[in-house]
Image (spheres, grey):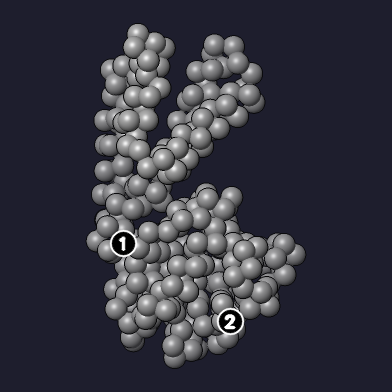
Amino acid sequence: MNKVIGFIGCGNMGRAMIGGVVKSGLLKPENVIVADGYKGSLDIASSEYGVNTTMDNKEVAKTSDIIVLSVKPNVYNSVIDDIKDFVKEDVVIVSIAAGKTIKDVEGAFGKDIKMVRTMPNTPALVGEGMTGICPNKNISKEEVEEVVNIFKSFGKIEIIDEKLMEVFISTSGSSPAYVFMFIEAMADAAVADGMPRNKAYKMAAQAVLGSAKMVLETGKHPGELKDMVCSPGGTTIEAVATLEEYGFRTAVIKGMRECTKKAKNM
């Protein structure tokens, strides 16, 4: 890609994205510029990836063909106020904030803009992110593909309708937290039965990683894969029956639906 990408905000997600585009070779470091109010974050980005840095959001606005707003939702409007009169005419704005709709961001700019609303998740930090992508009506297919390639550099993507973005948040954006809780609970049970904790975490995490890979690579229904493990009268079906007794699936479903509801009301 022969364009300049600017990042406003250099927290964990911003750095994950910067690392993805640079490490993948999608962009040369000199074609990336990053702004943040905290110099320490910029120093990390500069030393790790060799990108250009600044503490002036306007400098990013003036030089970038694609701008990623990787700041918290509560400062979106103030950041946009700071840059909206300095962005290039055909700039593509990429948002990553929960609760900020395409209409919200367009309204903050106060003019027609090319925009893609996205929602990445924290596994982007290890190159295994999952991102939901929703372009607005002003952006071309070629420009959407450029944004898609950014997010593919640190994981997988799905293009979805904006009305499903809150569902995506509960399914993928927030779900790493549920998975971490599951791994922690598995490890606690193993420790209770005598397994050293460091080994328990490793075993539980690898089981989750391998199981997820089976779903993605075999294309088989999760229920079918579960049945393959559950031998008649065996240990696994005993555990599955106990999880069902205590409402495992119901708890997951209820938790995710509450997450979706909260996202819709932000």
Q: Residue farthest to the top? A: 233
Q: Secondary structure at mark 1?
A: loop
Q: Which residue is mark 1?
A: 160
In the rendered image, the vertical position of residue 57 relative to residue 233, given as above or below: below
State the mark number for residue 147. none
Front residue (pair 97, 238): 238
Tell me: 164 left or right of 74.
left
Q: Which residue is mark 2?
A: 2
In the rendered image, the vertical position of residue 115 relative to residue 168, given as above or below: below
Tell me: 138 left or right of 184.
left
Q: Earlier in the sequence, mark 1 or mark 2?
A: 2
Labelled pair 1, 2 in contact (Cβ < 8 Å): no
Kind of residue at badge 2: Asn
Quarter of the image for residue 218 reads top left
Residue 246 appearing in the image:
no
Picture residue at 31% right of the left edge, 58% below the top:
165
Quarter of the image for residue 157 reads bottom left
Front residue (pair 218, 178): 218
Q: Total number of numbered labels?
A: 2
Picture residue at 33% right of the left edge, 86% below the top:
112
Quarter of the picture containing the N terminus is: bottom right
**Residue 119's x, y, as percent?**
41, 59
Kind of residue at badge 1: Ile
**Residue 63's x, y, as percent?**
58, 86
Q: Residue farthest to the right? A: 47
Q: Secondary structure at mark 2?
A: loop
Picture residue at 51% right of the left edge, 37% below the top:
209
Estimate how packed mark 1 is, as few (under 14), some (14 to 19) or many (20 or more) residues with alpha carbons within 10 Å: some
Picture residue at 31% right of the left edge, 16% below the top:
241
**Residue 23's x, y, as percent?**
65, 63
Mark pair 1, 2: CA separation: 27 Å
**Residue 220's x, y, as percent?**
35, 38
